[in-house]
Image (cartoon, helix red, strand yellow):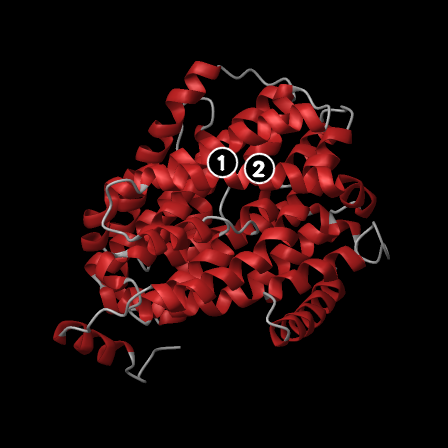
């Protein structure tokens, strides 16, 4: 298994370099490496490595959402908070509804199977969106209207909402006792409780760091480990009290940024380095789960389902931006920013298939869901990343840098970083 991981790292980095040279997001190459080495093509990967794939994907998702928390300030969220909540829910709900309708008609799925498909495809990709929004933020493009921060926060909450909905649908499908009314109430409760727990944990962490002053590397390890433990707490509370552990991970980063900004920037920089490794495992492992024949069979039907879902999402985004300060061109930028699919699809695309196998059920619908999840990545991630970068560079205006921002930038560039 260790040999397979080493091979995935080498081939993933090579594929990343080649695809970036072709102006294509590198994770597409990593995904194809997983497809090539997986059971569908060469069957080279160790089954034990495939068995721990879900855990590796979860860790990667935690890392990218932590980066969001360490980049969102309270002042920015105060200005765009209401709009963030609209963007986090309405576009995803409309996309899920459209895909549910189209899936049942074009793929012959049941309504519940189509709803699971919608919950997998509907999420925005933080792996594509977050690094680009961080780039625009550091360049101060769109900063006057807080556009990058608004998109980054809304996309992250969108992901968590979709994941919570997806878990409920999978549980209902495989026969677990799931009360639909309770699940509808549990979504906002889990988000709020997750935020409260994350704030409390964040306060405890920054005070711990103040007391013992560990190196930056040890701080980031503590943050990542604590976030994973919060997911474990979420699992232990399942059935008793809903809590979104991923929201807790974002919230603890938010608190540390608010209370100890320089410390937060150090941790964020370390997380960016860890993401290099996590990204390879995330996309190569999901590629290894793909059944090539099913992706091919999805073809034009899959393309139609994904495209109509995106149209529904775009309508939702435009409705959310009614009466906002954004120009038409800036609103189109937000629409484009909500298109890419990658991280969440990679993290949960195989979960219906695995749940069906574990329950001894027919796995055909799960394989179709996974195939369309991968197809959505291949179709939307490269095009989405390119158009976000292209349109953002031309539409977003550069905000003037204040004296305070200049001083903060000077502190962040201080070379005396602890290792």
- What numbered label is drawn on residue 50? none
Give the x, y percent position of residue 290: 75, 47
Residue 250 picture location, percent across and down: 36, 49
- Establish if 10 lies above or below 303: below
Residue that protrudes farthest toward the left in the picture:
403
Left or right, 164 with respect to 140, comes to: right
Q: Is residue 12 visible?
A: yes
What residue is shown with label 1? 312
Q: Are marks 2 and 1 in contact (CB under 8 Å)?
A: yes
Q: Quadrant of residue 352?
A: top right
Which residue lies under the disc numbered 2? 308
Neighbourhood count class around disc 2 (C-alpha, 10 Å): few under 14, some 14–19, many 20 upward: some
**Left or right: 10 in relation to 252:** right
Asked which secondary structure carries label 2, the reply is helix
Q: Residue at x 45, y 48 (%)?
A: 338
- Using residue 50 as the reference point, say whether residue 206 is left or right of it: left
Residue at image position (54%, 67%) is 276
The extreme front residue here reads 328
Image quarter of residue 405: bottom left
* Above or below 83: residue 61: below
Q: How many angstroms separate mark 2 from mark 1 (CA)?
A: 6 Å
- Residue drawn at the location 51% of the way across and 51% of the way down: 125
Q: Residue at x 68, y 53 (%)?
A: 285
Residue 20 place in picture, x, y as percent: 60, 72
In the rendered image, the vertical position of residue 328 relative to residue 371, given as above or below: below
Q: Indicate the position of residue 388 as horizontal and vertical percent values.
A: 46, 60
- Position of residue 284 relative to residue 214, above or below, is above
Mark 1 burial class by Cα count in 10 Å: few <14, some 14-19, many 20+: many
Q: Nearer the viewer, residue 366 or 178?
A: 366
* Quarter that holds the N terminus: bottom right
Quarter where residue 323 is shown: top left
């Amino acid at each position: 298994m260790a040999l397979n991981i080493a091979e995935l790292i080498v081939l993933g980095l090579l594929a990343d370099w080649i695809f970036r040279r072709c102006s294509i997001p590198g994770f597409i190459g990593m995904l194809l490496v997983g497809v090539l080495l997986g059971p569908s093509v060469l069957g080279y990967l160790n089954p034990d490595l495939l068995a721990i794939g879900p855990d590796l994907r979860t860790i990667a998702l935690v890392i990218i959402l932590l980066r969001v928390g360490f980049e969102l300030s309270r002042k920015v969220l105060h200005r765009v908070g209401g709009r963030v909540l609209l963007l986090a829910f309405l576009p995803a709900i409309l996309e899920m509804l459209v895909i549910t309708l189209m899936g049942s008609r074009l793929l012959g799925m049941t309504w519940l199977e189509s709803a699971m498909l919608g919950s997998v495809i509907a999420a925005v990709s933080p792996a594509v969106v977050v690094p680009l929004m961080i780039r625009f933020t550091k360049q101060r493009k769109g900063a006057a209207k807080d556009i990058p921060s608004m998109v980054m926060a809304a996309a992250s909450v969108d992901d968590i909402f979709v994941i919570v909905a997806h878990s409920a649908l999978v549980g209902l499908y495989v026969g677990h006792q799931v009360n639909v009314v309770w699940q509808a109430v549990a979504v906002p409760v889990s988000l709020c409780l997750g935020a409260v727990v994350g704030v409390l944990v964040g306060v405890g962490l920054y005070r711990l760091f103040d007391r013992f002053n560990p190196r930056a590397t040890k701080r980031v390890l503590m943050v990542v480990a604590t976030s994973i433990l919060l997911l474990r707490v979420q699992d232990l509370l399942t059935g008793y009290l809903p809590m979104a552990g991923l929201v807790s991970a974002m919230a603890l980063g938010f608190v540390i940024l608010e209370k100890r900004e320089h410390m937060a920037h150090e941790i964020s920089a370390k997380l960016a380095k860890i993401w290099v490794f996590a990204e390879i495992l995330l996309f190569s492992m999901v590629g290894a789960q793909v059944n090539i024949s099913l992706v091919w069979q999805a073809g034009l039907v899959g393309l139609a389902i994904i495209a109509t879902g995106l149209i529904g999402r775009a309508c939702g985004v435009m409705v959310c931006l009614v009466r906002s300060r954004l120009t038409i061109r800036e609103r189109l930028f937000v629409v484009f920013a909500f298109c890419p699919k990658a991280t969440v699809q990679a993290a949960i695309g195989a979960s219906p298939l695995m749940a069906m196998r574990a329950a001894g059920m027919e796995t055909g619908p799960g394989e179709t869901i996974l195939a369309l999840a991968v197809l959505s990545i291949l179709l939307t991630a490269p095009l989405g990343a390119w158009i976000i970068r292209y349109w953002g560079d031309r539409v977003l205006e550069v905000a003037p840098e204040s004296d305070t921002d200049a001083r903060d930038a000077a502190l962040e560039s201080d070379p005396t970083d602890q290792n």
